[in-house]
Image (tube, rainbow, N blue to C red):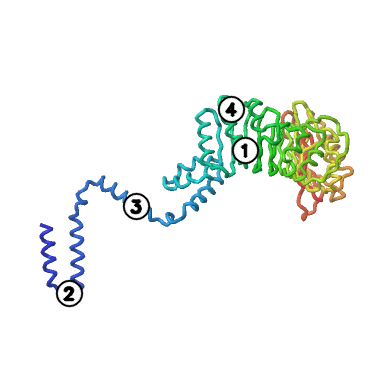
Amino acid sequence: MSRTLIDQTRIDLQTFSENTTHSQILRVLELQESLLAPIRTVPSNMLSQILRVLELQESLLAPIRTVPSNMLTTIFQLVIEASDEPDITYSTRVCSWWRHEAVSYATFWTKIKDSLRTTKMTAFLTECILRSGVSAPLSIGIVLVNPDVHPSVITILVAQAHRWRQATFKLSFVSSQYIDSLFPFEPSSTHFPLLEDLSVDSRRSFSNRILDCRPLQKLELGELEESYADVIGSRNLKVLKVGYYWGVSLARLLHQCPCLESLTLQCFKFTQKPDKQITCRSSLLALDIGGDLDNDEKIEYGAWNVFHSPTAYEADTSASELKEILKRSECALQYVNLILYVEEYDFLSAIALEMVEGFFADLPVKDEHPMWFPYCNVRWMWPHPALQFKMVLSAAANVPALQCGICHSLAFEKLLN
């Protein structure tokens, strides 16, 4: 019936002369015909799926689809580098089209972090390296805990050593023979021409591993001997962190690393008494020297020799040693934060006053009349209680405050030339 009325109306319109009305009636007829389309008889659930497909087709016309694939991958890589998560996890958070584009680029696979516990994970490492190409620099973070996978993993890593840019290895359970393969004794065996950042956490000695990596700027090791510091590309080092360091003097170490800006030694072991004076002018900005407190080990006087560093602003060493550094550096302190560890509360004040007066007896200060800041705090610091004092050496408001503290040793954060 509806089709008949529509057809008859079209015939009558052929004799109708009013153009405006004619076009309006034609539009109404088209709408009426659309209501008779076969798709209107499709069930609603199927119709919704058809509409969904149409929406997806329209999304292919979105402006982002006109962005070149290499630019999309660059954006993807920037997001990855800003996060600590492995690259591969991000590939599950984008559409399949973008994911396909991203994983096809070698740079996507150049950042590898994993704990290799099974042979399946070794196969995954191999796949990542194969996809990363042959020349793109690698950033690797590997934890080896399963001895069964050590040989194959070491072989894979050594083959790509020329591409390492940043490498972090936790090798606590790795035998020395595999460490020898990874970091050989012979300087010509393995080259690291791109390596800038290396961290090796191992119970095995690293002191006799010779590294050919002159670009190295940051190095973190569990153990290091002073005599080997000059064969690990140390001339360009800016950051050095060592768990156990054996040597004659810290001045000698700094002499071997002239560009060093930050030095952290958790424990310093003297191999012998300093036998000669070494004069060096260091670029050191941050210094953190610890000790084995369980054995009550302290840095002996003379470790610094005639080290001169007017730019240093963070340090932790023995009070007598630091006093000599301050005098040679011609520094002027303004603010002191003193923390003392003693067993008897009754003697805290006397000990603090005696130590402060003795330490600053012949040091240059900005005010000839140091004044005490009205602050005193007793707190528990294992294994003994600690009494904290603050002393202002200068009241000049236009001079930045310089903080110091004594905690078995004296620590200072900033020094002025």
Quick one: 24 or 272, which is closer to the camera? 272
| Circle 4 residues within 10 Å: few <14, some 14–19, many ≥20 | few
Are the residues at dot 3 and dot 4 in contact (C-beta closer than 8 Å)?
A: no
Q: Which residue is mark 4?
A: 151
Are the residues at dot 3 and dot 2 in contact (C-beta closer than 8 Å)?
A: no
* Numbered label attached to residue 409: none
| Circle 2 residues within 10 Å: few <14, some 14–19, many ≥20 | few
x 72%, y 44%: residue: 238
Are the residues at dot 2 and dot 1 in contact (C-beta closer than 8 Å)?
A: no
> Relative to residue 36, is residue 21 depicted above or below?
below
Q: CA distance from mark 1 to mark 4?
A: 15 Å
Q: On the rendered structure, is 118 left or right of 271?
A: left
| Type of amino acid at the residue the image marks with label 4 | Pro
Where residue 402 appears, as percent x and y from the top left, is 77, 47
x 67%, y 34%: residue: 189
Q: Which residue is mark 2?
A: 18
| Type of amino acid at the residue the image marks with label 2 | Glu
Q: Residue furthest bottom?
A: 17
Q: Which residue is mark 3?
A: 57
Q: Which residue is mark 1?
A: 161
Residue 64, quarter of picture: bottom left
Residue 229, quarter of picture: top right
One can see residue 257 in this view: yes
> Relative to residue 102, is residue 143 depicted above or below?
above
Q: Earlier in the sequence, mark 3 or mark 4?
A: 3
